[in-house]
Image (cartoon, helix red, strand yellow):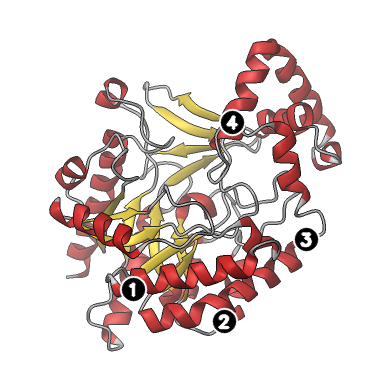
Amino acid sequence: MTEAMRWFGPGDSVSLAEIRQTGATAVFSALHDIPYGEAWPDEAIRARQAEIAAAGLRWEVVESVPVSEDIKSRSGACERHLENYRLTVRRLGAAGVRVVVYNFMPVIDWVRTDLAFRLPDGREALRYDPVQFAAFDLFALRREGAADDWGPAILEAARAWWESLGGPGQEAFTRQTLDLFPGVKLGLGVADFREMLARYGGIDAGGLRENLRAFLEAVLPAAEEAGVRLAIHPDDPPFPVLGLPRIVSTAADLAAISALNASPANGVCFCTGSLGARADNNLVGMVRSLGPRIHAAHLRSVSRGADGSICESGHLEGDVDMVGVVRALLNEQTARRRAGRPDWQICLRPDHGHRMLDDFRRPPPACPGYPLIGRMRGLAELRGVQRALAAEAE
């Protein structure tokens, strides 16, 4: 498979030159300065592509062209945003970029409560603690009905943890949590966030799935025409949060999305970390069932705690059968080549990584979970798995 790294653009503390030294040949990148819902200018796409090419790399996957809240909720400027999305996809296709990752998570893209959880050997990981997130929901956000979503034991533990923080600690944790949600501008207040949640007050999982169907129906013809494949990212974490519906969490969800539109451009970004947070997700079986619908891969592992916590593990550690997943992805790639697509190649990237070694002496990563050394270790491990499986197959 094509080996890539995520790059957040010119402001990223990890340079393209450093990414090339990891052995990666491609990047997942995006124009993060373009507001959600607006069309990406052709000249900006070409300039970013030229910058990446000048470093000896290829822009293989766009991560991501965000889907605006107006599109997800079918409100406001939805139709204008859909037209801008189609225009962006056409421009990316004309530039030769073939895969576009997107998500359909309402309001918040991903949730963590600890951005620097210290592991026994000194590495730092991202972690989700349900008690801490319940404290945010119950006592910072004060969401109506939140107490009904958390059991009595978690409610009691959340109250004790929240009180232990004290005023300054509570304020810092609230700010960190609000600022972490991608797509939410820095400085958003609790009241503003409540308003965003309110937009989905009448939208359940069925309604959100219908809005996804309408999005695909509107955009996939343009994607096919442009030679672009869309890849939906799973929910992170793969269960409801803050009363919001989640529709990309299980094998059944992904099968339903595949059935929404038969276009071969309707696909998945297979994220082992997001899907692996559920013990009932058989990742190897999901790769086999999705087959050619997998248009890109994020590979990372997680450790699931008995208390409901989720900690990001090393790429070959934790509860994800990474060797089995990589074997299944390689088998799918081979099957597509034998079926008349000799150029078919899945592009993978190590998703997130521990902060370790010289990462502690470098500037902070552009986004939590994206230090250089930790991701390079992950990429090297994944490369080793691929080489070992290739040798085994000979």
Q: Amino acid at mark 3?
A: Ile
Q: Position of residue 164 (x, y in %)?
A: 70, 12
Q: Amino acid at mark 1?
A: Gly
Q: Which corner quadrant of the image does residue 345 belong to?
A: bottom left
The label nearer to you, 3 versus 1, is 1
Q: How would you rate the neighbour count of disc 1 (Cα within 10 Å): few for under 14, some for 14-19, many for 20 or more?
A: many
The label nearer to you, 2 versus 1, is 1
The foreground one among 20 and 2 is 20
Q: Would residue 252 be seen by someone viewing this image from the given angle?
A: no
Q: Which of pointers 4 and 3 lies earlier in the amino acid sequence?
A: 4
Q: How would you rate the neighbour count of disc 3 (Cα within 10 Å): few for under 14, some for 14-19, many for 20 or more?
A: some
Question: Label 3, on which residue?
Answer: 203
Disc number placed over residue 261 in the picture, else none: 2
Q: How would you rate the neighbour count of disc 4 (Cα within 10 Å): few for under 14, some for 14-19, many for 20 or more?
A: few
Residue shown at the point (61%, 55%) measured from the top left: 105
Q: Which of pointers 2 and 1 lies earlier in the amino acid sequence?
A: 1
Question: Label 1, on which residue?
Answer: 93
Q: Which corner quadrant of the image does residue 180 belong to?
A: top right
Tell me the quarter of the image containing the N terminus.
Answer: bottom left
Q: Position of residue 66 (x, y in %)?
A: 50, 57
User: How many tags in the picture?
Assistant: 4
Is 241 on the left or on the right of 104, as rendered?
right
The label nearer to you, 4 versus 3, is 4
Q: Amino acid at mark 2?
A: Asn
Q: Position of residue 58 (x, y in %)?
A: 21, 60
Disc number placed over residue 187 in the picture, else none: 4
Q: Which of pointers 3 and 1 lies earlier in the amino acid sequence?
A: 1
